Structures are given as C-alpha cells and as structure tokens.
Amino acid sequence: MIKAVLFDLDGTLIDTAPDLGHALNLQRGHHGLAPLTDELIRPQASHGARGLLALGFDIGPDDAQFGPMREEFLQLYADNICRHSRPFDGVLDMLTQLENRGIAWGVVTNKPARFTEPLLSILDLADRAACIVSGDTCPQPKPHPGPLLYAAGEAGHKPEHCLYIGDAARDIEAAVAACMPALVAMWGYLDEADQPQNWGAKALIDTPMQILDFVT
C-alpha cells in the first residue's frame, strides 16, 4: 500500500525550464552570445547548472572557468527564480486528490535548498509538503538512494510504502536502490536519447493524474 508520494521537482512537479532558460540566456548575453531556443534548453533543464552550462558554453566541471560561470548562472537564476515557473498541468489537482485521500506527498530534488525552498514557497506548496529534501540536504544527491530514504523517514513511512516520480534516469536509479517503486514522468524534460523504458520504473505515465491509479 502506498502511503506517501515523493516527487522530483524540475521537470516532474514544476515546469522550471522557462526560468532556467531565461537565466542561461541572460548569462549568454553577458558574454556576447545569442540566446538559445526553448527547444534546445528544455531537455537540459533536469540536469541543473552542469547540463545547462555544457549546453550554453560547452564547459564542464574540469574546465577552469566552470566554477565562476556556475556561480554567475546560479545568481542569475536566484534573481529570476519564479518569473514563469508553474506546476505542470494537472499537478495541483493531483496533489489535492492525494491530500483528500490522506496520502502524504513530498519533494526530493537535486536542486540546492537556496532555490528549492523559495520556489515552493512562492508557489504556495512548501507548507503542504510532508517533506522537502534538496540536493544539499543529504551528504550525497541522487542517484544515491540516501535522499529518498531520508524523505521516507521524514514522511514517516517505509521506502516500500512510498512512490517516487521523476523524469530522469538518476531518479529511477535512486528509487530502485532505495527499494521504492517509481514512475517516469513522461511530460518532463526527457531527451530524444533517453530510454525510460529501460530505467527499471514500475510504469511510464503521461499525465500527473495517472499517479492516482497507483495509490488506490
């Protein structure tokens, strides 16, 4: 029996790609580069600063400029945290249905708390969540199972009685390692090269309301 539902944030619960893309294009503008299209940015939005900087500037953690560029990007994002970010269609109705059924829900994301908490507060979701586990809450982020195990404990339930929803391979890898059933949010920021059918999830779902089929 599922007693709690846990969600990834970017690309699963909230459509944050417009604001992440806005920050990236502001940064590109500061460096004399033209803006990128939403179509290019969206598949990288689940991969945080590392994925977006790789897309926007072709740099990675091994490059000397990565650290300063990452901080510049994160500050631009912090300054524009919720200009256009909104829950995906159907998410609010689904959360209300879970609450009406007495099923707790929470967030487990690799997004640092300095962004997670203000974003959820602005969207009036922070006080409704049974737990909020950010990328720096635990010693290791996903795909390590630690954040999911910690969230289950915060929600007061065993991992096998929690359901995790995510849109990236690391989400499902973490859930499998935590012995927690998982669903892939196909409305999220999947890339054409992704093969979610091979990630080990219980199912692939196309809308948030389909989650309710797995908690009855």
Image: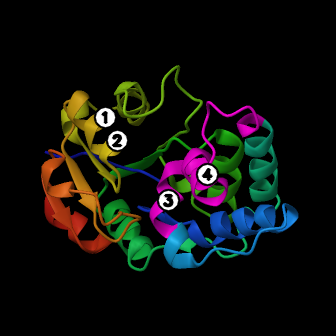
The structure residue drawn at horizontal position 63% and vertical position 40%, both measured from the top left corner, is 112
Q: Identify residue type, mark 2.
A: Arg
Above or below, 28 against 110 in this view is below
Question: What residue sits right under mark 2 in the picture?
Answer: 170
- Label 4: element kind: loop
Q: Residue at x 41, y 71 (%)?
A: 91
Query: Rounded to the nearest whole Å, what is the CA distance between mark 4 and mark 1?
Result: 28 Å
**Residue type, label 3:** Gln
- For label 3, the residue is 44
Quadrant housing the C terminus:
bottom left
Q: Secondary structure at mark 3?
A: helix
- What whole-number distance in Å separates the C-alpha atoms at marks 2 and 1? 6 Å
The residue positioned 27% from the left and 43% from the top of the image is 172
Residue type, mark 4 in image: Asp
Left or right placement of residue 172 versus residue 105 in this view: left
For disc 4, the neighbor class at 10 Å (few under 14, some 14 to 19, many from 20) is few
Q: Does the residue at mark 2 contact the one at mark 3 (Cβ under 8 Å)?
A: no
Residue identified by numbered label 1: 174
Q: Mark number for residue 101?
A: none
Main secondary structure type of the part rendered in magenta: helix
Earlier along the polypeptide chain: callout 4 or callout 3? 3
Q: Position of residue 92 (x, y in %)?
A: 44, 72
Q: Which residue is mark 4?
A: 58
Q: Does dot 1 land on a helix, a strand or a loop?
A: helix
